[in-house]
Amino acid sequence: SGDKSIGDQVQHQIIGIDPGAGIMKQAAQVLTDYELKDWKLVEGSGAAMAAALDKAYKDKKPIIVTGWTPHWMFAKYELKYLEDPKGTFGKDEEIRTIVRKGLKDSLPSAYAVLDRFEWTAEDMAVVMSAIIDGKKPEEAAADWVKNNAAKVDVWTKDLAKEDGKKLTLAYVAWDSEIASTNVVRQVLQERLGIKAEMLQVEAGPMWAGVSDGSADAMVAAWLPTTHQDYLDKYKDKVEDLGVNLKGTKLGLVVPSYMEIGSIEDLK
Ligand code: PBE
């Protein structure tokens, strides 16, 4: 590094994820708000971002990524959020469950489970870490359900089975949502006998799919900030079943060994 500016060290690149993610819009706004004129936001995927971070971290090289909590990367590496004094990334928000209209009539028990589903960042971390350690997502979810039977009992108490009925959960391949969607699928399958399928799409089609009924539900709505545009577009065509996880965060994330603390240091 030496005398090189942070920008020169990272080729003025911020490693982003899939273009439909709300965090990409926020990160693009960061470039405007902080007047980072010669910087680029690189599109990719959650997996590609994690791979780039892993490689840089192992070499102790500088890197700046779009990051969020809950995410396993904060357990695996020493990382920090860059301060965001202008507040472009918004405040803490919540993950909410959104279903198609009419689900309550066609699958009342599944609807009830989706309505009751609520867990913690620590719960989600258990599933995410198991997956990153090599477990298949469906196995990691099944283990969590087995080990948290009391919690799951609350979600399924007094509900009739809906054996053989089909239900589609739309999701985006963000690690947090791979974990939550697999757990909900496992519960619907094991406790209610539903044939629950997971449909991996981009963020826009996830919202569109629940609004037009091509998907039944999703547990991946980050609000009020990150998916605000999607909510504005579809709110009259979907049903919001409330919070399933509290205490999230988004921002620009760097390894702790980097000697910057704020987005303002990028200028
Ligand atoms: N994320 C994870 C998503 C929501 C969940 C922060 C990458 C997004 O930015 O849309």
Image (cartoon, helix red, strand yellow):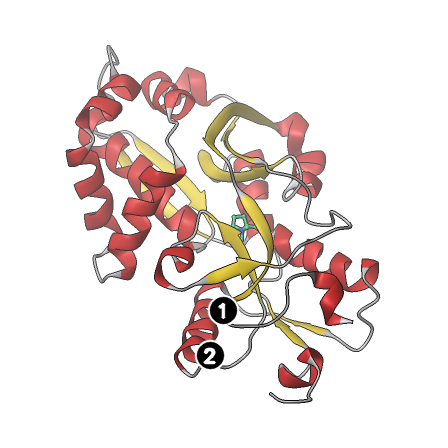
Q: Quadrant of residue 18?
A: bottom right
Q: Residues within 10 Å of mark 2 (few under 14, many from 20)?
A: some
Looking at the picture, how far across and down is residue 111, in whole percent?
39, 21
Instruction: Determine the secondary structure under disc 2.
Output: helix
Residue shown at the point (53%, 59%) measured from the top left: 80
Q: Quadrant of the C terminus?
A: bottom right
Give amino acid for label 2. Answer: Ala
Q: Residues within 10 Å of mark 1 (few under 14, many from 20)?
A: many
Q: Which residue is mark 1?
A: 49
> Distance from label 2 to label 1 (Cα)?
11 Å
Which of marks 1 and 2 precedes in the sequence? 1
Looking at the picture, how far across and down is residue 17, in whole percent?
55, 64
* Camera-nearest residue between 144 and 44: 144
- Would residue 9 be found to the left or right of residue 44 on screen? right
- Work out whether 3 lies above or below 36: below
Q: Disc 2, ligand 1: is the CB inside 8 Å? A: no
Looking at the picture, how far across and down is residue 226, in whole percent?
64, 44
Residue shown at the point (27%, 30%) measured from the top left: 188
Instruction: Determine the secondary structure under disc 1.
Output: helix
Q: Which residue is mark 2?
A: 56
- Would residue 189 be found to the left or right of residue 171 on screen? left
Residue shown at the point (39%, 79%) measured from the top left: 58
Residue 31 tag number: none
Instruction: Single out the mark in the foreground, 2 or 1.
Output: 2
Residue shown at the point (31%, 44%) measured from the top left: 182
- Work out whether 122 lies above or below 202: above
* Camera-nearest residue between 170 and 47: 47
Give amino acid for label 1. Answer: Met
- Would residue 134 be found to the left or right of residue 68 on screen? left
Q: Quadrant of the N terminus?
A: bottom right
* Camera-nearest residue between 79 and 158: 79
Q: Quadrant of residue 116?
A: top left
